[in-house]
Structures are given as structure tokens and as C-alpha cells.
Amino acid sequence: MIANDLHRFVSYCKKIQPQTQEDIKQFFEGVIVFPYDKELLLQAYLFLNIKNLFPDCCELLLFEKSPIADYTDLGKCDFVYLTLQGNLFLIETKFIDTEATGPTERKRRNKHRNKVFEQVITLKNRFSEYWDIKLNQLECGVFTTDAEVEWRGNGMNVITRSIAIDQLEKWRRSYRRIN
């Protein structure tokens, strides 16, 4: 049973994100064929493999939209899913270049690692305040190309998953042949 405030949010999502799951799947399959953006390719992988990565997610409610009316200055969430338990699952993605070397790149990677966690936790709090949804009804996840994030979520109550850049590219090439 979805709580009333959560139900109100789900109704709002259906208005501002009217595309069907099939429409979104077709969009992401297009990204695989023409991968013009690395972050979008990572998001395509997440969407098309959501059950393997975050098994409780059952329905995509929002993709790259602000969860707080049209206040994009308050942040937009990469993915908002409804879970099997009737909660919301917020997922932030980040393509982190793990192949680049040197001190500047190490610093940039660390900044990106920290930022993706900060984003999802900030969004969780804003969701809770704006929609009057209890914090225990909001779950968070982070999906990146950097296995270094795996342990970072433990103390923050954030579920982390990653895929190596070479594995992402291998998946992209094989997906095109299979489908």
C-alpha cells in the first residue's frame, strides 16, 4: 500500500514523465547504437539491467527530471524508481574516467566520487521535505564506472553499484548484436 503523500508524488510523475517504459527502452537502445554521450550510455546500461543491479526497483517514475515541481535549480534526479515495497529509490549515475592517469585525474575522480553521493543524499532530503515523504520511504543508490565507490555507500545508507568502462563498452557491442 502506497502512503498518501507517496501516491501524490507518483501521480505527479505520471503527468510530467508520460512516456511508457517501452518508449524509454527504445530511447536507451538508440543511445547504445549511437553512444554520443558516455553518461547516457551508463544510464542506458542501468535502465536495461535495473533488475540485476537494483532488484527492488520495479517502475521508472522519473528520468533526468526535477522531483520538485520544475525547480531544476534544486537539482534533478537521474532516476526515480518505485520499489516492490512501495518506496521510492533515487539513483544518481556518474561516468568516472578511471582510465586517465596523473595527479589531476586522481583529484577529479575523487571529486566526482564525493559529488555523486552528495547529490543523492541532498535529493533524498529535498524529496522528504517537499513531498512530505518519510525518510524511511526513500532509498538511495549510486551507479558509476568506478569500483572505488563500492565501499563509500556503507556508512551513508546508499547502495552502490559499478561497471568497469571496458565492460560497459563490451556490453554495448554485444547488445547491438543480440537485439
Image: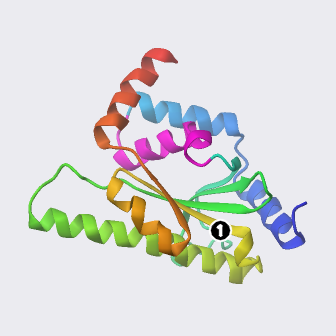
Query: Where does residue 22 sit, x and y in percent of width and height?
Result: 68, 33
For image coordinates 55% across by 38% down, the residue present is 49
Q: Is residue 41 magenta?
A: yes
For image coordinates 58% across by 32% down, the residue present is 26
Q: Toward the viewer: 176 or 107?
A: 107
27 lies left or right of 82: left
Query: Where does residue 99 sit, x and y in percent of width and height?
Result: 19, 48
Query: For the residue marked with disc 1, what is the amino acid?
Result: Pro
Residue matched to label 1: 67
For image coordinates 88% across by 68% down, the residue present is 3
Magenta extent: 35-54
Task: Give the overall secondary structure of the magenta segment.
Answer: helix
For image coordinates 49% across by 40% down, the residue present is 44
Query: Where does residue 17 sit, x and y in percent of width and height?
Result: 69, 53
| Vertical position of residue 85 compared to residue 118: above or below | above
Q: Residue furthest bottom?
A: 129
Helix, strand or loop at label 1? It is loop
Q: Toward the viewer: 176 or 146?
A: 146
139 lies left or right of 169: right
